[in-house]
Amino acid sequence: TQLLEQSPQFLSIQEGENLTVYCNSSSVFSSLQWYRQEPGEGPVLLVTVVTGGEVKKLKRLTFQFGDARKDSSLHITAAQTGDTGLYLCAGARSGGSNYKLTFGKGTLLTVNP
Amino acid sequence: GAGVSQTPSNKVTEKGKYVELRCDPISGHTALYWYRQSLGQGPEFLIYFQGTGAADDSGLPNDRFFAVRPEGSVSTLKIQRTERGDSAVYLCASSLRAADTEAFFGQGTRLTVV
């Protein structure tokens, strides 16, 4: 059972466009992380959000954690070809197993020149 | 080392053979994790080590899978009697402390069972 649903699964856009990808769950997470993964590489952490309603910005990337800590979104402004990659969200549960990350299937983003 | 190192990068093996996958974590990181990523999927948790002991092996799919970390640093994931369904990218990650969920991933070992 996939506890974290990511949408869309695939996204192909032109350089300069804006986009938003979503990560939804029926479960509450103590924290949620966004990773970017390029072919042949492991996931690289972009951001961790821990507070419901939290918004974090990383240059052109804006991350939001839902008020109920069940969902999150990633917005990219003026996408660049270097943003191409697989974007994964991963949630950590509270309590004794907070080390264990549950990943979504990811959104494969292609930014065309 | 500078980052998490996994060897080999690629491994092709025949069905039924035994394989070992190695992970060298970031120096000083006490927590180590193994994940498995099948094609088109996100990584799935396999096992977590705190120091030398396997604190949580609930993600190992069956008893053909086993992992060790004898000196609290390098870890080896061992798969016996490999099956075609074991084909995947095996990712290792480490973090400074278990409660510190900022884990750093290696590049993975792509295992192909033919």
Image: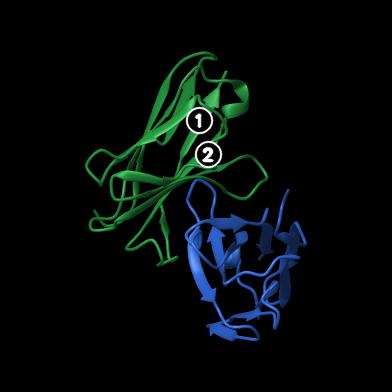
Chain colours: A blue, B green
Give the distance between the C-alpha atoms of the residues marked 2 and 1, in whole angstroms: 6 Å
Q: Residue at x 76, y 65 (%)?
A: A26
Q: Is residue A56 left or right of residue A15?
A: left
Above or below — where is B52 with respect to A31? Answer: above
**Mark 1 Cα-neighbour bin, 10 Å: few <14, some 14–19, many ≥20:** many
Q: Which mark is residue B45?
A: none
Q: Is residue B107 visible?
A: no
Q: Position of residue B102 (x, y in %)?
A: 43, 66
Q: Residue A19, located in which quarter of the rendered image?
A: bottom right
Q: Residue at x 60, y 86 (%)?
A: A55
Earlier-in-chain disc, 2 versus 1 = 2
Please name the amino acid that badge 2 sits on: Val
Q: Give the labeled residue for mark 2.
A: B89
Please name the amino acid that badge 1 sits on: Leu
Q: Quadrant of the C terminus of chain A?
A: bottom right
Is disc 2 placed on a helix, strand or loop? strand
Q: Which mark is residue B111?
A: 1
Above or below — where is B70 with respect to A83? Answer: above
Label pair 2/1, CB-CB below 8 angstroms: yes
Q: Residue B21, located in which quarter of the rendered image?
A: top left
Foreground pick, B57 / B77? B57
Foreground pick, A38 / B106? B106
Chain under callout 1:
B
Q: Position of residue B16 (x, y in %)?
A: 52, 13
Is disc 1 placed on a helix, strand or loop? strand
Above or below — where is A16 with respect to B72? Answer: below
Foreground pick, B17 / A15? B17
Q: Residue A111, located in which quarter of the rendered image?
A: bottom right
**Mark 2 Cα-neighbour bin, 10 Å: few <14, some 14–19, many ≥20:** many
Q: Residue at x 41, y 36 (%)?
A: B9
Foreground pick, B69 / B102? B69
Q: Position of residue B106 (x, y in %)?
A: 40, 50
